[in-house]
Image: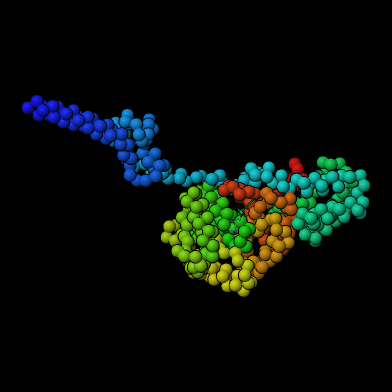
Amino acid sequence: MELLIIILVIVVVIGGAGTTLLVRTRRRVPPPRHRAQGSGPATDTLQAPGAAQAQAPDTAEAEPEVRTLPPDVAAPPPAPPTPAVEKPPPLAGRLVRLRGRLARSQSALGGVLLSLLSSDRLDDETWDEIEETLITADMGVAPARQVVEDLRTEVKVAGTRDPAEVRALLREELLSQVGVDMDRSLHIARHGDRPAVILVVGVNGTGKTTTVAKLARALMGDGQSVLLGAADTFRAAAADQLQTWGDRVGAPVVRADREGADPASVAFDAVNEGIQRDVDVVIVDTAGRLHTKAGLMDELGKIKRVISRHATVDEVLLVLDATTGQNGLRQARVFAEVVDVTGVVLTKLDGTAKGGIVIAVQRELGVPVKLVGLGEGPDDLAPFEPEVFVDAIVGS
Ligand code: GDP
């Protein structure tokens, strides 16, 4: 009997110790990750403020905190805010606002011209230098000669070297070359229940797609409703770029569902959609592959024909990169031969001192520069104003 009691006591003691051990072991099991959906960062977004210690895996104290997370922590993360539609500044007066950028790129030209013109020895050699300076600024040989000829006469008649007077003479001469009387307005009035249509053409890389987007923004800033057609179907990136801009400004974009689709059919759909949605202006971006002249003619001709079935193409804007000089002028010539260009958009004028291209391209095509690009920003597009431009060259 005594032996039995001793055995019982031993069993009870050993059993109690084992239970204690088991309890301790359980407590040391790290708390389970409370959200199963994966990686650290995702779990982090579900943490309540101040619950940081709950992540410490092997502390017994951590466990209760994890279990007492407030119920709202389990709610899904808030949806990302929908981007607000921006309201860009209106087009009018933009060149004055961007004047600093224009002056930065163009004033070197004016500086050289003015110092030559007001030098004491205004002989043949100096006049040659003036002509060379103008040609180097991409003005073209014939206009440069004309400027020199006119200025020679005027300086002689005025008999002056006074810097202010010389500046006034140069200003007048450049203004007459740039042309103050050309109609530079965009023809974008609706036709009854039909939207106005702008076709934007030009070689890839000139800034065509960016220009379409900037123009859409500007027109919307002016209170017009705009729809974009991504008829550059050869580069998916171009349609994506346009889509992004469209989303930002709140302009719908009609695009192909696959790369390489027929650009004319996209243009057709865009105009159709523009009519359905009753928008004011449809802007169609086109592909700028200068493969062959015949190919380009076919493509742009077809786009124009197809649009004309139910709307009027009001503007054909040719986008030219102002930094490309003679090459740009060659492109301009080809495009002007295949489609009736109604206006030129000179991009990257902020990146070149060769503002003479304005005069050269107008002379080459007989159509005005209507818009200029002065940077990569969304609002760096401005209507071209001869006075502001010339003042940026000669300093005012
Ligand atoms: P696309 O191939 O003709 O459609 O050309 P993109 O619109 O893609 O533009 C080509 C590059 O030129 C991009 O990096 C633009 O940001 C840049 N760009 C366009 N316009 C201007 C401008 O007026 N000034 C400057 N500095 N860059 C520009």
Determine whether 147 is above or below 55 in the image: below
Left or right for 76, reference 168: left
Question: In the rendered view, does 217 fall on the left or right side of 24?
Answer: right
Q: Measured from the top left, where is residue 337 in percent x and y?
A: 65, 69
Q: Residue furthest top?
A: 2
Counting from the top left corner in percent of width and height, residue 302 is at 54, 71
Residue 40 in view in this figure: yes
Towards the viewer: 355 or 41: 41
Q: Nearer the viewer, residue 103 or 43?
A: 43
Residue 15 percent across, percent down from the top left: 18, 31
Q: Is residue 124 above or below residue 94?
A: below
Q: Is residue 11 left or right of residue 30?
A: left
List x then y, in percent, for residue 210: 57, 54
Q: Is residue 210 above or below residue 4?
A: below
Picture quadrant where residue 300 is located: bottom right
Badge count? 0
Q: Residue at x 56, y 70 (%)?
A: 299
- In front here: 105 or 159? 105
Indicate the quadrant of ligand 1 in the picture. Answer: bottom right
The quadrant the C terminus occupies is top right
As displayed, is residue 31 above or below residue 2? below
Asked whether the viewer can see residue 72, the reply is no
- Residue at 29 percent across and 31 percent down: it is 64
